[in-house]
Image: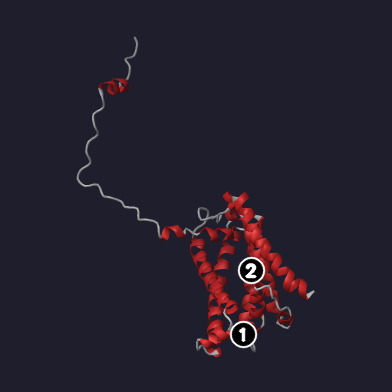
Amino acid sequence: MNTLIWVVLPYACLAVFVAGHVWRWRHDQFGWTTHTSQLLESRLLRLGSPLFHLGAFGVIGGHAMGLLVPASVTSALGIPEHLYHAVAVWGGTVTGLVLVAGLILLIARRLVNGRIRRVTTRMDKVLYAGLTAMVLLGMTATVAKNLLGDGYDYRETIAVWFRGVFWFQPHTELMTGAPLVYQLHAIGGFLFLALWPFTRLVHVWSAPLAYLWRPYVVYRARRGPVPPPAPAPAEVRDAARPSPSRP
């Protein structure tokens, strides 16, 4: 069972993540979009979307730092363990709360606005349910276990297993002793990756980065008065005249 959960499942989810994006791009390019509903409601979206995206960027950055950077690297850089732990816990709590606030607003606008509720697809509902579960598990692990509890050093267990998945050396024994909330969060994370290609989240790979280095569009102001239009030729004037009515 441990091999199925901590070896087979991650690789299966990663395979679906890659193959799903390829299939989606080849067969559903017109659906490769955010499916924005801004025209239907903008007040809550104007507040909820920035909060959600800022919180998501912070959470993703924190996960990348905690899972991909070994403890030996931060120690070699002279960062004490207690300082790293404090920054990780408080930073994760703040960015997590920002993400929660944005997610609540985005879900609320789909529940209270009838027009948006009618255009919400079944996959949107699955996406929001998955996001809610992932955020709740992550906040529980951060706040209940590390901020208010005794703490848990996931960098010596979960992070090592996570990096081992990509090195094709997953150490399943490191996950069997992890707290249940961390185990569920890890499983949910890989399942969420498998869900990703079939949702509106594919739009993150289509960010308009080309705008950063494209040449500027130069607009030249018109100087002086606008010249009058050139007189039309005689044949054009004659064709434009109304024909005389017959008696």
Residue closest to the eye, 176 or 236: 176
Report the amino acid beneath label 1: Asn
For image coordinates 53% across by 80% down, the residue present is 91
In the drawing, does residue 146 fall left or right of residue 8? left
Q: Which residue is mark 2?
A: 132
Residue closest to the eye, 92 or 12: 12
Under tag 1, what secondary structure?
helix
Residue 97 in view: no
Q: Which residue is mark 1?
A: 146
Quadrant of the frame with the N terminus: bottom right
Under tag 2, what secondary structure?
helix
Q: Establish if 133 lies above or below 83.
A: above
Residue 6 in view: yes
Which picture quadrant has residue 66?
Answer: bottom right
Q: Establish if 224 lies above or below 130.
A: above
Q: Earlier in the sequence, mark 2 or mark 1?
A: 2
Q: Nearer the viewer, mark 2 or mark 1?
A: 1
Quadrant of the frame with the C terminus: top left
Badges 2 and 1: C-beta atoms under 8 Å apart? no
Farthest top residue in view: 247
For image coordinates 64% across by 65% down, the residue present is 193
Please rate how many residues cluster around mark 1, counting C-alpha atoms within 10 Å: few if below 14, some from 14 to 19, many from 20: many
The count of marks equals: 2
For image coordinates 70% across by 67% down, the residue present is 11
Q: Residue 166: which disc?
A: none
In the image, residue 105 lies at what x, y percent? 55, 66
State the CA–CA distance, disc 2 to disc 1: 20 Å
In the drawing, does residue 173 fall left or right of residue 60? right
Report the amino acid beneath label 2: Thr
In the image, residue 227 lies at what x, y percent? 22, 38
Farthest left residue in view: 224
Q: Establish if 134 lies above or below 238.
A: below
